[in-house]
Every structure is written in C-alpha cells, then in structure tokens.
Image: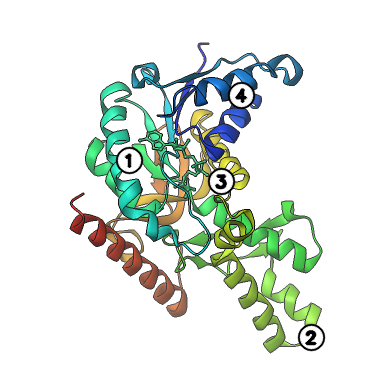
Amino acid sequence: MAHKKIALIGGGQIGGVLAQLIAMKQLGDVVLYDIVEDLPQGKTLDIAEAARVDGFDVKVTGTNNYKDIAGSDLVIVTAGLPRKPGMSRDDLLSTNAKIMKVVAENVREYAPNSIVMIISNPLDAMVTLFKKVSGFPANRVLGQAGVLDSSRFSTFIAWELGVSVKDVNAMVLGGHGDTMVPLIRYANVNGIPVMEMLERKYKDKAKAKEVIMAMVERTKMAGGEVVKLLKTGSAFYSPASSATAMAESILLDEKRLLPACALLNGEFGVTGYYAGVPAVLGANGIERVVELSLDADEQAAFDNSINAVKKLVEDMERLGF
Ligand code: APR
C-alpha cells in the first residue's frame, strides 16, 4: 500500500517535533514546509538521518515550495507566531490571521482533497478563517486543542491522586482560551469519579472542591505556565503529541472519540461556530460530533466560552478577515 502523505505547514518548534513523531510512528511520508529558507530542509535531514536508529522507512523532506504538498492526505498547520510571556493567545490574532489566510489559499490550491488540522493560535479563530478561505467542508477542517487541554487536566489529576495517568479520563470542552471548560463531573479514574476519590482522600467535601478547582484553574492557565518558564515561545512537545494522536485516528481510521475543535451545527445549542467538543475522528476527518448532557453550571460555562469565541471571530472580521 502506498504511504499516506502528511504535510506540516510551519517548521518551527511544534512542526519539528510533529515531523519526528509522525515518522517514528510511520504514519506516512512527511513534507515539512516553512517560509524560512533551509530551516525545514535542515530539520528533516536531521530527522531522516535517525531513520536507521529508530527503524522507520517513511520519507521526511523539507520544502519552501507549496507545490510539494500536492496529494497530501492530511495537512497540519502550525505556521504563525507563538506567545511570549504576558501575552494571551488572542494577542496573536492579527499576525497569525494574515499568515493563516495565505496558508489556506495554498492548501486549497495544492492539496484540495486533504483533511486539515490547525494548531496555530488563537485556535478557534484560526480554524474559522481556514474554513472560510479554503471553502473545504466542515468535516475536513478541524483544530487541535482539547486533546492537549484534557491531557494537562488528566496529568494534574493523576499527580494529585497518586495514580497512573493512563487510567485518568478527563475532558476539556469549549474554546481554547481562558474560558475553556474542564468537565469535573465526567472526570474519572477507570470509571471512578474523581470527585469521589478526592472526597475520600480529604474526608471533606469543601476541601475536595477546593482541590479540584485549583486543578481546573491550572488547566486553564497551563499554556501560560509553560510560556512563562520558556520565555521565548510556547509549549511544543505536548501540542505535537496531541496532534499526532488525532492524526493517527484520522489516518488509521481508528474512530477515536477525542475532544476536537469542530464546526457546530446545532450541537450544544450552537450553530456556525467552531469550539472544542467530543468528536469521532476517522478517515473522513470529523465523522460526527458527540453530544453529552451538561448541567446548568456546565452549560453556562460552555456558553460563556462560546461567547469568547464569538468575540474573537468578530474581532477578526473587524480586522478584515
Ligand atoms: N508560512 C509558513 N510558515 C510560517 C509563516 C508563513 N507565512 N510565517 C511563519 N511561519 C513559520 C515560522 O517560520 C516558524 O518556523 O511558523 C513557524 C512557527 O514556529 P514557532 O515560532 O516555533 O512556533 P510553535 O511553537 O511551533 O507554535 C506554532 O502553534 O500553539 C500554536 O501559539 C502557537 O501559533 C503558534 C503555533
């Protein structure tokens, strides 16, 4: 069987790790594109030269020419600037929208049948813009955020409860900003509600609530926590891992149910906006959005997050995109 082809637009921190992870998992041949001359060629040469050691035989090449993405099955976009300390994701809006418009025009021209996953921030706005400019159907344009936010939430829960993170299931929905919605009620350790475990640990409901709320807050601010430490950029290992999990589900048609940034068409009471929701990811991209019941507080938090996404999209439209 011919290898699948994966184009990575943006050969910076996330793009480089993505190229290596995708090669090591042999998901397909990788083409890494960047506007900076020689950068994607250098990174991919370096990765390709580890093939003997890591035992992969997919091709990993770099380019500054969009023509080389022709025939891609999957395109993952990280082009754009990352945050510096003190910046919110939304501060990247105008710079990254300019870049995303050009990316979308080129992907539309050279890889018109691809499924596209956006990682660039501010995520919800960037996915919206890509969809608008490309005119691709909604199932083929999605964003990566929820898998990472959920992994961060799960990590904090595992540390707190002293259990393997492999047994923690926790989901974060909504927009990929400070209003994101970590779902406490659904968080569990192999089926046991996290709140029950916390209440047993502390033998005090109020203390358990305080502890979970601290983890919720840390999850919301987790990207900023890394930015503050790195000083020169934002998280890249965990976003690359998260996107690789989504790519794997799409390329291998695994139909995993993962939180993804998807265009809503009435689900969760929202129409016409992108937001993080549970979705089945397979060979057709977003194969379906999966709804779940939210109580009044969760729905209010979700609506608040959608309002933040709407404001971001309006700001982008006001900028002329
Ligand atoms: N076309 C293609 N690539 C571009 C363009 C463009 N018009 N403009 C910039 N780039 C490239 C840069 O040259 C750089 O190599 O995008 C790359 C971005 O890489 P980094 O600066 O290392 O950023 P990274 O950490 O990979 O994050 C990328 O993902 O999580 C988000 O907020 C983050 O928006 C940021 C994006």
- Say what secondary structure mark 4 lies in: helix
Q: CA distance from mark 4 to mark 2?
A: 48 Å
Judge depth for marks 3 and 2 and give the one in front.
3
Q: Earlier in the sequence, mark 4 or mark 3?
A: 4
* Gap between marks 1 and 3 measured at Cα: 20 Å
Q: Taking the image as drawn, is residue 30 in sight?
A: no
Choose between 130 and 204: the one closer to the eye.
130
Kindly identify which residue carries mark 1: 99
State which mark lies toward you, 4 or 2. Answer: 4
Three-letter code, disc 1: Ile
Label 2: how many residues lie within 10 Å, few (<14), some (14-19) or many (20+)?
few
Residue marked by disc 4 = 23
Q: Quadrant of residue 187?
A: bottom right
Q: Is residue 90 above or below residue 47?
A: below
Residue underneath mark 2: 203
- C-alpha gap between disc 1 and disc 2: 52 Å
* Disc with the residue nearer the chain's start (3 vs 2): 2
Query: In this rendering, which labeled residue sits more in front, label 1 or label 3?
Result: 1
N-terminal of the pair, mark 4 or mark 2, is 4
Asked if the residue at tag 2 contacts the one at tag 3, i.e. Cβ–Cβ closer than 8 Å, the answer is: no
119 lies above or below 180: above
Taking the image as four quarters, which one is ligand 1 found in? top left
For disc 3, the marked residue is 239
